[in-house]
Image (cartoon, rainbow, N blue to C red):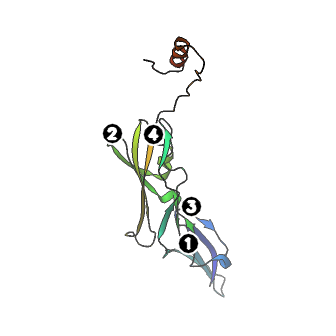
Amino acid sequence: VKISKLKMKAAGASSYKTIKTSAFSTKNAGTYKVTYSVNDPWGRSTTKTFKFTVKSADKPVISGAKDRTVETGSSNAVTGVTGKQGSSSRTSAITVTIKDPSGNTKTMSYSEAKSYVFSEDGNYTVTYKLVSTADKSVIAKTTVTITAQAALKEVPNVKGMTEEAAAKALQDAGFTVK
C-alpha cells in the first residue's frame, strides 16, 4: 500500500492543494485528503480516499485592530486587521460586527467588511471575532472605535486682508462668516 496522492486545505483556505508526502506534518493545521492505492500480484488495483482534519492547539489571535479616524464616505473596516492561529493565516475567517452612529448593527464576513462604507459622521463600534479551528468555544475578540468625520476644510490665509476681503475668501472656501 502506498500514498498515491496527498492534498491539503489549510485552515481558512477555500481549496485543496497537492503537497508532497515528505512535506506532510500534523503540525500544520488543515484538512487533508489522502488517497491510498494498492496493487495485487494479478494486476488488479484499487484506491481509497479519505479526509482527516488536523486542528491547531494554538489560540486564534487578531492583530492590527486599533481605534482610528476615517473620512465620512470612505470604506474598509478591516484595514490592517489580520488573524492567525498557530502558523496558519486565518484572516479571511474573521467576522466583523459594526454598530453605526444611529445604533444599527450589522455582522459580515471579512471580505464584506472591506467594502463597508462609513456613510455618516460619528463613532462606529467595530468588533472583530475569530473562532478557533480546534475548539469553537475559544474565540479571539477585539473591539475598536472608528470615527468617521467629514474632511477638514483648508483655511485660507487671510493675514493682511481687509475684513471684507477676508470674509469673502473664507466664504469662497466654504466657511460661514458672521
Which label sits in the foreground, 1 or 3?
A: 3
Mark 2 sits on what residue?
Answer: 102
**In terms of image quadrants, where is residue 48?**
bottom right
Image quarter where the C terminus lies is top left
Q: Nearer the viewer, residue 1 or 172?
A: 172
Quadrant of the frame with the N terminus: bottom right
Tell me the kind of residue under disc 4.
Ala
User: Disc 2 and disc 4: Cα gap in Å?
Assistant: 13 Å
Characterize the local packing of mark 4: few (<14), some (14-19) or many (20 or more) Cα atoms within 10 angstroms: many
Pointer 1: what residue? Answer: 33
**Alpha-carbon span between mark 1 and mark 4:** 46 Å
Q: Secondary structure at mark 1?
A: strand
Residue bearing mark 3: 15
Q: Which residue is mark 4?
A: 148
Sequence-wise, which precedes: disc 1 or disc 3? 3
Circle 2 — which element? loop
Compute the Cα span from label 3 to label 2. 39 Å
- Distance from disc 1 to disc 3, alpha carbons, whole Å, reads 11 Å
Compared to residue 56, the image places residue 146 above or below, namely: above
